[in-house]
Image: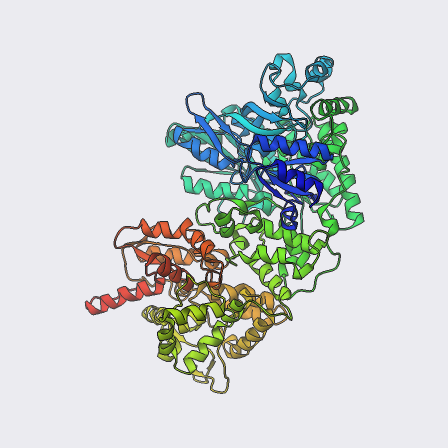
Amino acid sequence: MTDLEAALRKAVRGDVRFDVTSRALTTMDASNYRRVPLAVVAPRDADDVAAVLAVCREHSVPVVARGGGTSIAGQATGTGVVLDFTRHMNRLLSLDPSSRTAVVQPGLVLDRLQEAAAPHGLRFGPDPSTHSRCTLGGMIGNNSCGSHSVAWGTTADSVRELDVVTVRGRRSRLGQGWAGAPEGLRELVEGDLARLRTGFPELPRRISGYALDALLPERGADVARSFCGSEGTLGILTEAVVRLVESPRARALAVLGYPDEGAAAEAAAGLLPHGPLTVEGMAADLVPAAVALPRGGAWLFVETGGDTEAEARARAETIVRAADVMDALVVTDPAGQRALWRIREDASGTATRMPDGSEAWPGWEDCAVPPARLGAYLRDFRGLLGEHGLRGTPYGHFGDGCIHVRIDFDLLTDTGVGRFRRFSQELADLVAAHGGSLSGEHGDGQARAELLPRMYGPELVRLFERAKGVWDPDDLLNPGMLVRPAPLDSNLRFSVLPREPVDVAFGYPADGGDFSAAVRRCVGVAKCRTTSAPGSSVMCPSFRATGEEEHSTRGRARLLHEMLAGELVTDGWRSEEVRDALDLCLSCKGCRSDCPVGVDMATYKAEFLHHHYGGRRRPAAHYAMGWLPVWLRAVARTRAARAANLLAGVRPLAAVAKRLGGLAPERDIPRLATRTFSRSFRPRGDGPRGRVVLWPDTFTEHLSPEVGQAAVRVLEAAGIGTVLPPTLRTASGGFRPLAARRGRVCCGLTYVSTGQLDRARTVLRRTLDLMAPVLETDLLVVVLEPSCAAALRTDLPELLHDDERAARLASRVVTFAEALERLAPGWRPPRVDRPAVGQTHCHQHAVLGDAAERRLREAAGLTGELAGGCCGLAGNFGFEKGHFEVSRACAEEQLLPAVRAAADGTVVLADGFSCRTQLGQLAGVRGRHLAEVLAEVLAERLEEGLEGPGT
């Protein structure tokens, strides 16, 4: 134990961590930069903060304060001790509706404050797009803003008082009238009043540098306001009194269409006299093609408020009439507004990929100019990009003249890094020429601090240095930021990654086959760190269950990054730190769709396990659960299902079996079907609407044959014939079994999820051989189990990327509802006319989509929305020893409460076997596949002699 570690553990009551994992998780923020800290400390209170500072001052070790780690300029990284406020100092201490103030700790996530203020009709004004995970301390450190800044300003505008501990242990409450100012600060300001009155550009989003002008006497000598935006370089925040604003009772969103971003930028400033809450802009290349927006190539999102929906709409329509637009849309429906805002909020991630899939990076993320100059600035900015052969897609706070953009810098080669430096210098000059600020929201950090003399001039920057010296004479608080900065092209996080592609099993088609590029996808925007799953989203259930960074998608990506770097995590694919972090990944694939940059941790986990256990003995559960199709087929061949069920019902025998198989002792072993689905299947005649191949997945075949039987009945009622693979078209146009081909088709899911990729490839190649006759036809392949359908859609072509048949089969895979919609579009399902509850399968949400299922439920009269999140069983995950508590916590987040709250007679839907098993074992409720529900109503109608559903 080092002297520093011993001293910290003795002095601090909070968590003191020197382990590899904790340090690896904090090497990066959401920027291009990387630094390896010595330790991570999670203080419990202000006394702990003071103790850490005392120890670090004694050992001359730097200290960096960190909130959510979503800073994009490098200011949340450091080589000394990182203070993590999200673990303990994360509370809302009080909220006073009468004075419209709240007292918060620095680790409090913004959304938690908004939730507490909402019942009083109040809110915190600034709202960055990372509101679900950014902390108040980070917002104060960066002087964050958000989309509503045209109405409510920056964080500095919402701060009343700040409790701060300085590097030498002084505790102060900062406020107006020089309250809390360190000795020497007033003299410094009063000695240079003329420079402070003339040296700062006047614009709403001037964030760069220190806000020393807030200390002018005519501005109230506001020390708290001046502290905002100091990026943890002056003192450590321990508590804040913040101002709340009245939230409009109703809102409307006007979406204004313009020919291009230049026209939108020119129009933005003219809308401000109408008092909008937001004026946000973005162009077509950041908008998903499926989103219905007004005609145009760029749009302004202009939000208005009012006491009533009619009043908010009227204000929005006034703005539409005042705006010179190609087309416009006014949305008052809250769900519709949320869907549109989600596009804007995800832009910080989606902008990291250019339309052709190439990478783009932060670094010039948030320059700001006077709003009236935005159009001219954007034209010059585009010209500068062209001169350097770079591309980027601007978007952001057009009403405040603040532009976000990710640029396709080459940060992997010396030539590319040189271009990055030259472009940065020239852009800084351009911003200054337009009277702007290098940072308009997220701070200077390392990305821009070196260039501050181009904006402020050397004399004012020297005044910044003197102010830093007054607050932090030992230069231990986040050194290298704002003053005496590190070069903007040093400490780049990509410099440590291997230059040659890593040998991997999956194809990573979206990343050019490069696993390093796949890992680089994570830019740290941390959407995976949300503590609740909004709406139908899934990512990241394990983080929400544990609250640990290493169990977030970002945390795991960081560890994989460090594994590839080899500096901190030194044992590569054999790393136990990476293995342990991935152990609680449910492979739900939620990140594949919910992560703005498309990180696919389920695939990365399978890849890692493949290499980690290569040539070594695996955990018992990998053999028990990974080889499940083999064991179940053996039981079926020997007709031993009844005996197996009998033995599983004997508790001592079941306990032994679970212990040998590495299964959770809390789990019941599912009962096997005594007659498999394929044995009970009888080929149907050609339906009037065609025929489909019905995939006999392992779960339907051996555990839930009733689902397959129900699907056959419904498809037949819709005029669709079914056949099981392998099949072959005969000369007469019919089908017959291929007696010459032996074996069963399999999607390989259980092998993939346990990282047995060599075995998975063998199984999948055999499956392609068996499916060859089907691939010669145009038949659809209906897969009832969502996880198996997702494996065939994604894992198959990505694992067998060298076999063109894999992509052909993947393109044929459809869900039950999709088959009905495509082949029988005019068919009307039987009316159930009951409320429904349940959960959309996580793989369905992430890979397949559930639009067809929603339409089918609506047509059948099944009302209500299914829950988001993940059931927590997730195939083998919830059955493995040591996972039960996390599995149950995931189910308790949304699924189980929704089911318990359901009224009598509500249909419980669960298309996945895992979801049905979780419901049965944790809630004693039988969930059913949608096909079962429809088949049951069909049978009732036939028994009653009623006419079936028509066309």
Residue 224 against residue 631 in the figure, above or below: above
Whether residue 421 is visible: yes
Q: Nearer the viewer, residue 927 or 171?
A: 171
Residue 10's quadrant in the figure? top right
Residue 361 appears left or right of 595: right
Residue 708 appears left or right of 553: left
Q: Position of residue 652 (x, y in %)?
A: 39, 70
Residue 3 against residue 155 in the figure, above or below: below
Residue 608's quadrant in the figure? bottom right
Q: Nearer the viewer, residue 856 or 662?
A: 662
Q: Residue at x 76, y 36 (%)?
A: 486
Q: Residue at x 37, y 78 (%)?
A: 643
Q: Position of residue 99 (x, y in %)?
A: 44, 20
Q: Residue furthest left?
A: 944
Q: Position of residue 634 (x, y in %)?
A: 45, 80
Q: How many marks?
A: 0
Residue 898 appears left or right of 321: left
Specify how the rendered protein is coloured: rainbow
Whether residue 675 is visible: no
Assign the C terminus to one quadrant of the image.
Answer: bottom left
Q: Position of residue 621 (x, y in %)?
A: 51, 67
Residue 137 against residue 881 in the figure, above or below: above
